[in-house]
Amino acid sequence: MHKKVLCPVRAMMQKPAGLPSNANFWARYQANGHSAEELAHLVTADPSPLVRLEAVRSLEGLHAVQYADCFASALEDQEMIVRRAAIKALVSLRCPLSTHVRVLATRLDDEFWPVRLWASKGLGTVGDVAQPFAGKLANVAMLDEHMAVREEAAKAWGNLGDAAVPHVERLCQQLVDCAFEERERGCIALAHALSAPDITMRQVVANGFSMLIDRADQKVVNNIKQHNNSGKVEACEREIVNAVSVALLHEDLFLRKEAIETLFDLATRTN
């Protein structure tokens, strides 16, 4: 009967006598000391999830950007912790993500919220190639159960420029007649969507508020007519609408959120 022979990589990982039995320590010991090529093999091929996890972390520690495809493959791992480590490595190492946009978008539906968080971060860095997923990011920004995920998705959504505008318009329309709690969440999402570092990009996204601004302006006119107020009052209220519109582009998140809330108040008031 022939003796079973291990492959060189697995043979190197036989547990020596005297090492601690702690599983996490053993996984780190197994992944330690291998070349990037060996680690890339372990990321998807090793049967132990702890070894796969430590292989991902070790590969990230080597700044092995050339193994982006390996990290992307690990996003299909059954273990949440491996998927989280893989997507964190893929995004934080600034790997070329343009070819992995679809798999990143798929991870927006991951059951593990840190994976959804890193997927949102990644999609916020790839530019125009993420435009087909603007609607999905908008939905995550509004509906995800975790605030941190909603915020990152909204920022990524706001980085898409023209592709974000229809979804800003849609959300504004939906929020006009919704309950206060839902509108509060929506205002936060919209405020984060206006956080792009590039002012030109923020101006483009702000075009999605035109319906809301027009509606607020019309409410001012109707209110003046209904109460026979003077033109001076009308001018004053229109100045408020204009000031709020300008505040949409402010760098401060709180002021942007406050401006959006004020616009909704002006656009939905009944008298």
Image (cartoon, rainbow, N blue to C red):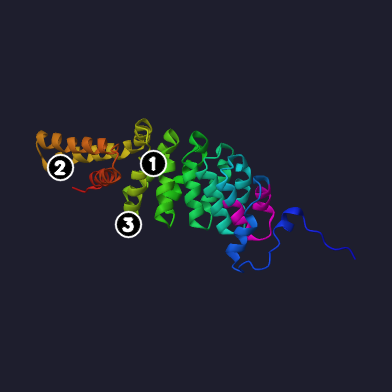
Is residue 175 at all visible to an observer of this figure?
no
On the image, the x and y values in percent for residue 268 come to 26, 47
Q: Quadrant of residue 220?
A: top left
**Mark 2 = which residue?**
226
Point out the frontmost of discs 2 and 3.
3
Q: Nearer the viewer, residue 269 or 8?
A: 8
CA separation in Å, label 2 and label 1: 31 Å
Q: In which quarter of the image is residue 203?
A: top left
Q: Which of 208 and 79 is in front in this view?
A: 79
**Mark 1 = which residue?**
168
Span shown in magenta: 38-57
Q: How crowded is mark 1: few (under 14 residues within 10 Å), some or many (20 or more)?
A: many
Of mark 3 and mark 1, the one earlier in the sequence is: 1
Side of 188 relative to 265 (left or right): right
Residue 116 magenta: no
Of mark 2 and mark 3, the one earlier in the sequence is: 3
